[in-house]
Amino acid sequence: MAFPQPRPQAPQLPQHLLRTIDCQQGAVRAVRFNADGNYLLSCGSDKSLKLWSVSRGTLLKTYSGHGYEVLDADGSFDNSQLCTCSSDKTVILWDVATGQVTRKLRGHAGKVNCVQFNEEATVILSGSIDGTVRCWDTRSRRFEPIQVLDEARDGISSLKVLQHELLTGSVDGRVRRYDLRMGQLHVDFISSQYTGHKMKGYKLDCCLSSKDTHVLSCSEDGHVYCWDLVEGSLSLKLPVGKAVVQSLSFHPTETCLLTAMEGRVQVWGAEPEETEEDAMAT
């Protein structure tokens, strides 16, 4: 006789506040985990990028070189390089250890909303309000992009690169999927699938959980909304504070979430963090 398989446990969601980091760099425009999730990057309206330890909440380094507020950042797979983009229309490649600007890339006609390395960190991809995605060779001394993708009819708000595919989101309401190996483009019109959050005047982040079970979004009402990916039902409405939650980032493997509100970053976990007193009691 075969016994029924136990029902799989429902995936946990990060709803316990572990720590709050006062970034002291004006409003935090974006917060991002690095590749392994041990560090976080905070992008400030004071033109700076800061690197922090997630577990301790301590500042490790400050990177200064942009002429206006920093809007997005990404770390390379080996943690040796960072890339950032800014309202000053530039993309900067940084050396993590020295904090020095390796290259400053110009070419976009408006503020640059999003930036990401490819998996080998040989190319930086940047998306701008000018409606283009530009691809920059990190090893070349050339200052022109190796490719410009200009199919969008409005600003590029987000991008994601994975192996030979590039996904872009645009204010024109379309998601474009570029197969860079085959040279093909697929366009999808996206309607409102996950609803309830408030988004009127800000560019807000959304992301998937580490196991791709949930969609998470910032909201102007001070919450993070978390929906079941398949059903579209609201699983969690996480109260962050009384202002706009402008950015978020999910840990690459663990149930851990970063949120940014005004000048602070919050670190959330699935369970409350064990204190020294708890450890001594056990």
Image (spheres, rainbow, N blue to C red):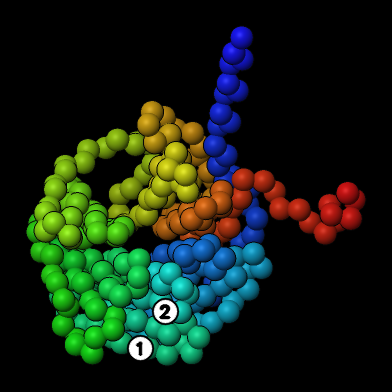
View extreme (right): residue: 281
Along the line of sight, the residue nearer the viewer: 269 or 47: 269
The answer to whether residue 171 is visible is: no
- In the picture, the quarter occupied by the N terminus is top right
Q: Which residue appears at 54% of the width and 82% of the height?
A: 61
User: Quick one: SS at disc 1?
Assistant: strand
Circle nearer the N terminus (2, 1): 2
**Mark 1, residues whose alpha carbon is within 10 Å: few (<14), some, or many (≥20)?**
some
Q: Give me the disc on residue 55.
A: none
Give the residue at the far top of this rendering. Answer: 1
Instruction: Please name the residue shown 55% across and 42% down the image.
Output: 13
Please say whether residue 235 is visible from this viewpoint.
yes
Q: Quadrant of residue 131?
A: bottom left
To which residue does mark 1 refer?
102
Seen in the image, is 25 located left or right of residue 162? right
Question: How far from the left and from the top, in percent, is residue 221?
Answer: 44, 46
Are the residues flagged by discs 2 and 1 in contact, CB closer than 8 Å?
A: yes
Residue at coordinates 48% horizontally, 60% vertically from top-left? Answer: 260
Mark 2 crowd level (few <14, some 14–19, many ≥20, 10 Å Cα): some
Q: Tag 1: residue type?
A: Thr
The residue positioned 55% from the left and 32% from the top of the image is 10
**How many angstroms separate mark 2 from mark 1 (CA)?**
9 Å
61 in relation to 222, above or below:
below
Inspect the image, locate mark 2, and give the three-letter code of the amino acid beneath it.
Gln
Q: Is residue 77 left or right of residue 256?
A: left
Check disc 2 and report the residue beneath it: 81
Query: Percent position (x, y) of residue 19?
Result: 64, 59
Q: Position of residue 235 (x, y in %)?
A: 49, 33
